[in-house]
Image (cartoon, rainbow, N blue to C red):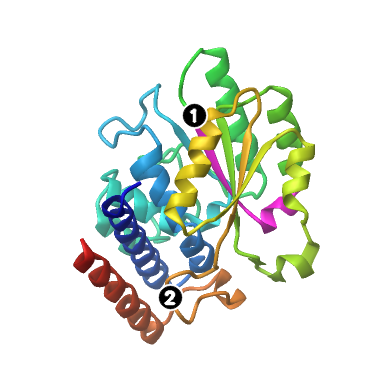
């Protein structure tokens, strides 16, 4: 990937973070921390990796994406808006009664959403079903699912992992957003999941560990996944919760609350300054 491409992706990711902050502020609720940590990966997926078309969101041959940690949809919505699935102004109505964008993804009401998610652990199971269906139908599409690291405490995640390996779902990529924090505190203290790489390997996965904010490493991981045959891939992405907003970074308090007016203005100023800096380098 050349520097121009990386700059363009970085600008889009910063805009996605801004959209997540806008949404959670106007909702007066939501989950900004984990939305910001996963923004780079979702940006890469929609603008570099996946075969998707906003003009034909139900294309049978499209790649599929499942946000298994569905509460972190604010940045997904921002990415979908940037991609052209719906208007950016929808972000201002996040979580409002009757609005398109609800607190968890809704495949029936929101263009670009492939699976309704919210109950942790279930999204990855749905992704397995999509991948298996692709195999049965001799389709070339790929399926991507983002999990939270705290979500990996759910037993259903490991039932799905066993299923994926048994069925040799090499068209499935599971990405774990390892920001190290969950609603009750540090993952290591609530219910430690390490060694996560050895766990996925023991279930039959190809495992790749990356910096989830480094586009070169993200690209290399997805290329590795495409080259891997007869087994699913797990990408363990080390990230920073609240990435891009100084007072939110690595702070568990920002797992599940919206910013107040002063916090919103500070966050927007920081993100807009980063967007301007990056655009100045293009």
Per the rendered image, the range of residues in magenta is: 143-154
Residue in the picture at 76% in, 66% down = 188
**Residue with the mark numbered 1:** 142
The residue shown at (52%, 56%) is: 212
Magenta segment includes 262:
no
- Residue 71 rendering spot, x and y as whole percentages: 54, 57
Q: Residues within 10 Å of mark 2 (few under 14, many from 20)?
A: many
**Residue extending farthest bottom:** 262
Where, quadrant-wise, is the C terminus in this rendering? bottom left
Spot occupied by residue 109 in the image (x, y as percentages of width and height): 39, 42
- The answer to which of 41 and 4 lies nearer the viewer is 4
The disc placed on residue 245 is 2
**149 magenta-colored:** yes
Left or right of residue 63, residue 239 in this image: right
- Image position of 209 with respect to 180: above or below: above
Badge 1: few (under 14), some or many (20 or more) residues near its Cα, within 10 Å? many
């Amino acid at each position: 990937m050349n520097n121009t491409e990386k700059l363009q992706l970085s600008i889009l990711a910063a805009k996605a973070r801004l959209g997540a902050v806008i949404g959670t502020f106007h909702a007066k609720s939501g989950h900004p921390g984990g939305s910001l940590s996963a923004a780079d990966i979702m940006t890469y997926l929609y603008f570099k990796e996946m075969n998707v078309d906003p003009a034909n969101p139900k294309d049978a041959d499209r790649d599929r994406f499942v946000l298994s940690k569905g509460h972190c949809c604010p940045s997904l919505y921002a990415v979908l808006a940037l991609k052209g699935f719906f208007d950016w102004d929808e972000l201002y109505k996040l979580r409002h009664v009757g609005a398109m964008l609800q607190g968890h993804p809704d495949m029936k009401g929101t263009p670009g959403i492939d699976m309704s998610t919210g109950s942790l652990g279930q999204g990855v199971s749905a992704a397995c079903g999509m991948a298996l269906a692709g195999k049965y139908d001799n389709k070339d599409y790929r399926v991507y699912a983002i999990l939270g690291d705290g979500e990996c405490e759910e037993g259903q995640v490991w039932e799905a992992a066993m299923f994926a390996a048994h069925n040799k779902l090499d068209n499935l990529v599971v990405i774990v957003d390892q920001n190290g924090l969950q609603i009750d505190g540090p993952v290591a203290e609530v219910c430690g999941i390490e060694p996560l790489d050895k766990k996925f390997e023991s279930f039959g996965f190809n495992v790749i560990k990356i910096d989830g904010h480094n586009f070169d490493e993200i690209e290399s991981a997805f290329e590795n996944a495409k080259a891997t045959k007869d087994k699913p891939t797990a990408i363990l992405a080390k990230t920073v919760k609240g990435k891009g907003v100084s007072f939110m970074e690595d702070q568990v308090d920002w797992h599940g609350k919206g910013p107040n007016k002063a916090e919103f203005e500070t966050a927007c100023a920081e993100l807009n300054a980063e967007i301007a800096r990056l655009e100045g380098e293009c």
